[in-house]
Image (cartoon, grey):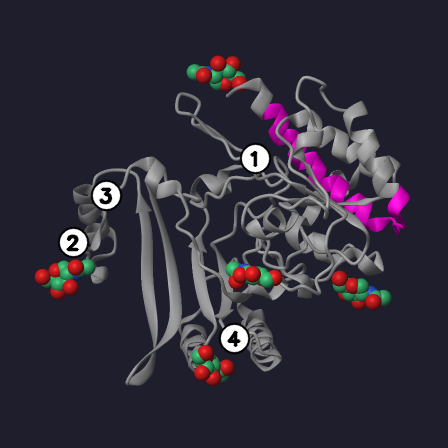
Amino acid sequence: MKPSNSTLASLTQNLVVLLFIFTFCAVSSSSSHIENFLDCLPQHSDPSSSISQTVYTPENPSFSSILKAYIRNLRFNTSSAPKPLAIVTPLDKSHVQASVICAKTNEIELRIRSGGHDYEGLSYVSSNPFVLLDMFNFRSIDIDLANETAWVQSGATLVAPRTDPNLFIRVESKVIREGKKTVEVSFIALYLGRASDLVQLVNKEFPLLGLRHNDTQELSWLESSLNPPLGFNYEKHKSDYVKTPIPKVGLEALWKKMLELENITLQFNPYGGKMGKIPKTATPFPHREGTLFKIQYLALWNDDSQEFTDRNLRGMKEMYDFMAPYVSKNPREAFLNYRDIDIGTNANKSLAFALDYFKENVPRLLKRS
Ligand SMILES: *[C@@H]1O[C@H](CO)[C@@H](O)[C@H](O)[C@H]1NC(C)=O
Ligand SMILES: *[C@@H]1O[C@H](CO)[C@@H](O)[C@H](O)[C@H]1NC(C)=O
Ligand SMILES: *[C@@H]1O[C@H](CO)[C@@H](O)[C@H](O)[C@H]1NC(C)=O
Ligand SMILES: *[C@@H]1O[C@H](CO)[C@@H](O)[C@H](O)[C@H]1NC(C)=O
Ligand SMILES: *[C@@H]1O[C@H](CO)[C@@H](O)[C@H](O)[C@H]1NC(C)=O
């Protein structure tokens, strides 16, 4: 791994922490603050890479297209959503450093947008005056096969956690209507190796699936790691972690609940394997040994009416309440990348939500060095 990339990776982790600290302080701002912010940037960045070419203010004709380029959830693609005072699209790590320093000295809130997973729009919408630090230019992925490590920069959109060295299976259950309403359960797998070996492996370990060669598709590693475009929807997501197997009666009740609510999809992502071997405190991510799988709840709809939004949000809440007995408790853990504003925010200065995402790592993450 290149030292410059590792520096950048740890730098962006620090930025997440800074973001928490910033949104704690009640921030006041005015137009002079943003002018001072813009004047400040060149003073704190590497002169060999001009920072001004990476800054977009609302007067710039590209401002709106840059802002919208990474808005995936149509719920936040509205003209009434508050817009940033400026967007910085760093090309160099000194641009990131300058943005943080200048935002802090000028008391402007900084929102940081990385990959595509901001389900609540928190990285590009704020009720306070803010600057958007948009990391989309940092999307390199460096693989070091000898050390078995990969550095993924924060703007990259790759999702393929593998729990086993070669096989990752995600299970997805959703309601389908083919005449009668039923719950369809799909097994979606990524396997590092040839299709024929996969068919053999799956038929040995999961014979009931009856996998055939024509159910599989061979891709290069690179093709398999690129997210297909997701399309645009109105969306709500939530997450849970499961520590003890859900009993059969629980699963049966779950299928019934899904049929009743109709439009809530569940994805089960296995943990364990290498994920479980990394100590809980090695990185901010705490969902390690003892975690069987993560559930993602998804509601996707394509109608912009308030009635549909309300109905889907209500359905989601009902499913989440229903699942409480089967998932982690005290705290009820959640996956940071599936941002869920129902868990809480730091608006009331409570850190309860941060415990759900980071557990015992919270005090260490908030410590100023
Ligand atoms: C987002 O809203 C703008 C109008 O402000 C519209 O032109 C654009 O098509 C919308 N994006 C999507 C993906 O629908
Ligand atoms: C593995 O990582 C170490 C430390 O970052 C580095 O010094 C070494 O060169 C790497 N090994 C290979 C084969 O790249
Ligand atoms: C695979 O082949 C079987 C039997 O020929 C067929 O029923 C099935 O639809 C095929 N599956 C796919 C994904 O093409
Ligand atoms: C589920 O979505 C469909 C299609 O959008 C809609 O017709 C139906 O009313 C929804 N069901 C519920 C319970 O919200
Ligand atoms: C603050 O928010 C947390 C959840 O984030 C909630 O548990 C707590 O009751 C709230 N406190 C107040 C005083 O509103």
Where disc 3 sits, the SS reads: loop
Q: Amino acid at mark 1?
A: Asn
* Mark 2 CB lies closer than 8 A to ligand 3: yes
Q: Label 1: which residue? A: 137
Q: Amino acid at mark 3?
A: Glu
**Residue depicted at x 64% and y 46%:** 61
Quadrant showing the C terminus: top right
Q: Bounds of the magenta span?
A: 6-32
Q: Label 4: which residue? A: 303
* Mark 4 CB lies closer than 8 A to ligand 4: yes
Q: CA distance from mark 1 to mark 4?
A: 32 Å
Where disc 4 sits, the SS reads: loop
- Left or right of 142 in this view: 181: left
Q: Is residue 107 visible?
A: no
Q: CA distance from mark 3 to mark 2?
A: 10 Å
N-term mark: 2 or 1: 1
Residue 177 appears at what percent x and percent y?
33, 80
Q: Nearer the viewer, residue 152 or 89?
A: 89
Q: Which label sits on residue 218?
A: 3
